[in-house]
């Protein structure tokens, strides 16, 4: 190699320090700022694969290892859980960030659901230690109970989403926290949470369309042996012309649960009463019979 060639090689290596290096041994290194209050690193990789949403996943799901979760505030408070808005995004890829709903079940302050025993008939826990702790009502038992409700809702969302039903996409579950799609509509100042059915005043055509959607969804559920168990205009969201069913921790098996039929009739009564009050002639007994025809 001549002195001139050596000079050219040195110049190239100075300008391109990785010149000549096999790309398989090259990785990109990016630094991230320290997290602020109300932030955490993404928990996507902290949970096992089965605790992540079903595939194919929507394109908006953020899976970057550098993503940061930022709490945006409380969306809704309840007796058993609170729902927060949470933004997940990679600071180096701001265009990919997404806002989700984070439902967090209470642990030590957890209150049991109304008539919870009748909802959980037919369910079981894997570890006898957990069963004993829940029955004693110890601090650990309340934590277990909270996680059980989160897992129950997670399982219901995954199942119903896979069946093509109108429920929020379940992103992941981690202990007592369930991350899911934020159902929103376009408001004057940008996206805002879709209103509950009870807050709407639809015209006749939209009212009829909504009832048809709900009847079809309930029919698909009972065909697969599932009853919402606590359906009402307060846990159905109106995302424009589309209805989305939420709050599913207490779903029951239509056959395995002794109260399955009673819960189904109550669901029919709750929704028919609201639609009837808005001027749509519907009957809960007729709806109940129609659903049973789909179930058996």
Image (spheres, rainbow, N blue to C red):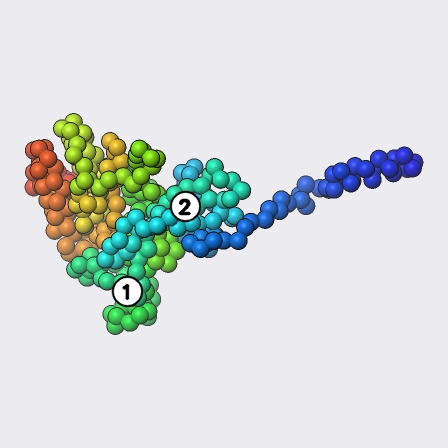
Query: Residue 131 is drawn in which quadrant?
Result: bottom left
Judge from the rendering whether residue 269 lies leftward or rightward of residue 119; answer left or right. left
User: Callout 1 environment at 10 Å: few (<14), some (14 to 19), or many (20+)?
Assistant: some
Q: Quadrant of the N terminus?
A: top right
Q: Which element is circle 2 on?
A: strand
Mark 2 and mark 1 lie on one chain; the one further toward the N terminus is 2
Which x, y percent locates residue 242?
A: 25, 34
Query: What's the residue at 14%, 50% (across, down)?
Result: 263
Query: Residue at label 1?
Result: 109
Q: Residue 44's x, y, as percent?
A: 45, 50
Name the residue at 28% across, 64% down: 109
Q: Which residue is identified by label 2? A: 87
From the image, which quarter does the C terminus lie in?
top left
Evaluate whether residue 149 shows in this view.
yes
Q: Is residue 261 above or below residue 106?
A: above
Residue drawn at 14 percent across, 54 percent down: 259
Q: Characterize the local packing of mark 2: few (<14), some (14-19) or many (20 or more) Cα atoms within 10 angstroms.
A: some
Q: Nearer the viewer, residue 190 or 84?
A: 190
């Amino acid at each position: 190699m001549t002195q001139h060639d050596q000079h050219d090689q040195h110049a190239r290596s100075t300008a391109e320090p990785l010149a000549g290096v096999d790309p398989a041994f090259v990785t990109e290194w990016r630094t991230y700022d320290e997290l602020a209050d109300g932030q955490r690193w993404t928990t996507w990789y902290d949970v096992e694969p089965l605790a992540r949403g079903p595939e194919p996943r929507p394109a908006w799901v953020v899976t970057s290892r550098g993503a940061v979760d930022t709490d945006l505030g409380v969306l809704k408070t309840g007796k058993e859980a609170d729902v927060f808005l949470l933004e997940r995004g990679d600071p180096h890829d701001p265009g990919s960030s997404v806002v989700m709903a984070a439902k967090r079940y209470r642990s030590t302050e957890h209150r049991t659901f109304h008539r919870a025993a009748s909802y959980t008939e037919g369910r079981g826990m894997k570890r006898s230690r957990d069963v004993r702790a829940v029955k004693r009502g110890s601090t650990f038992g309340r934590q277990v109970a909270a996680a059980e409700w989160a897992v129950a809702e997670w399982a219901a969302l995954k199942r119903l989403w896979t069946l093509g039903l109108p429920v929020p996409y379940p992103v992941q579950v981690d202990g007592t926290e369930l991350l899911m799609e934020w159902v929103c509509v376009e408001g004057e100042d940008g996206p805002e949470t879709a209103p509950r059915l009870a807050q709407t005043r639809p015209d006749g055509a939209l009212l009829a369309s909504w009832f048809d959607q709900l009847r079809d969804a309930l029919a698909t559920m009972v065909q697969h042996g599932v009853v919402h168990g606590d359906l009402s205009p307060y846990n159905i969201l109106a995302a424009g012309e589309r209805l989305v069913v939420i709050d599913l921790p207490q779903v029951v098996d239509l056959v395995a649960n002794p109260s399955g039929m009673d819960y189904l009739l109550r669901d029919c009564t709750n929704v028919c009463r609201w639609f009837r009050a808005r001027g749509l002639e519907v009957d809960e007994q007729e709806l109940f019979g129609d659903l049973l025809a789909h179930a058996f």
